[in-house]
Image (cartoon, rainbow, N blue to C red):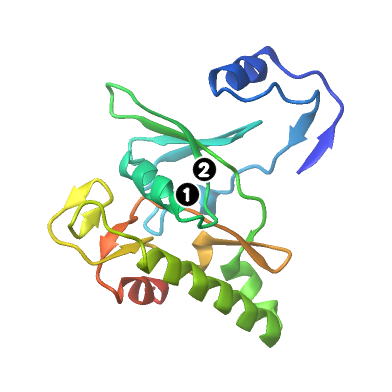
Amino acid sequence: MAATGKTVSLYTTLLAHKLHHPPPEEMTLELPQPSKEFLAQKDGSRGIFLIYDYYGFVKSGRKVHLKEKHALDLAAELNIPAPRVYEVSSAPDGIVSIRMDYIEGENLEELWPDMSEEDRQDICGQLREIISTMQSAEFKTGAIGSCGGGLFRELFSHGDLSQHNIIIKDMEIAGVIDWEYGGWAPEYWEYVKFFEV
């Protein structure tokens, strides 16, 4: 993200006040534009819009689910590198919006082919620590399913932990994104989902 000296918009100042944040410095952030790959699920049916602003972005659409907030809240409790949620809303027409951090970097899927063996081993070690932290979480619902509740319990899982959902910056895992499938799942679930085509 590059910053240039500009006047901060009234909208940004009001948003800072609403979120109980200090007003931002006077600058304009040049944020990347979302790509079609980022907006579309594997089957092209996601129907999600991303709107960038000073504090991150808003993920919004009919296929965005409130349960993603529960998974992100638990990830924050566990100090897992993931977007922090600032605000969630649900409209009568079924549109759910989640305002969260933008995590800068590139996805592991794009970087992996050109990474050195040493960098690959380092990233695998970081990922192993993240998964161990997730699996050591104390369950709150007693059930397999979303973080809001389900049928029976195993381990806290991202639910779609794959290379395209792992963001790397300076050869460090900057964040794990897209937690809409996060919840309680069998111990082997992350492994299965990581290699799913």
Q: Is residue 155 above or below residue 8?
A: below
Amino acid under label 1? Ala
- Identified at 36% across, 57% down, the residue is 43
Task: Give how far apart the Cα atoms at labels 1 and 2 are.
Answer: 7 Å
Q: Residue furthest left?
A: 151
Q: Quarter holding the C terminus?
A: bottom left
For the residue marked with disc 2, what is the amino acid? Answer: Arg
Residue 70 at what x, y percent from top left? 35, 44
Instruction: Give me the residue at 43% from left, 72% from top.
Output: 132
What numbered label is drawn on residue 148?
none
Q: Do the residues under discs 1 and 2 have CB atoms within 8 angstroms?
A: yes
Q: Residue at x 66, y 31 (%)?
A: 54
Question: Which class describes the residues within 10 Å of circle 1: few (<14), some (14-19), or many (20+)?
Answer: some
Drawn side of residue 33 relative to residue 196, left or right: right
Of tags 1 and 2, the one toward the viewer is 1
Observer able to see residue 104: yes
Where residue 105 sits: x, y (%)? 67, 56
Which is more toward the observer, 134 or 7?
134
Name the side, left or right, on which 86 lies relative to 1: left
The residue that label 2 is drawn on is 84
Query: Is 103 left, or right, of 95 in this rendering?
Result: right
80 over 129 or under it: above or below:
above
| Residue 87 image position (x, y, % from top left) | 46, 30
Q: Mark 2: which secondary structure? A: loop
| Circle nearer the N terminus (1, 2) | 1
Q: Which residue is mark 1?
A: 76
- Relative image position of residue 173 (x, y in whole percent): 61, 64
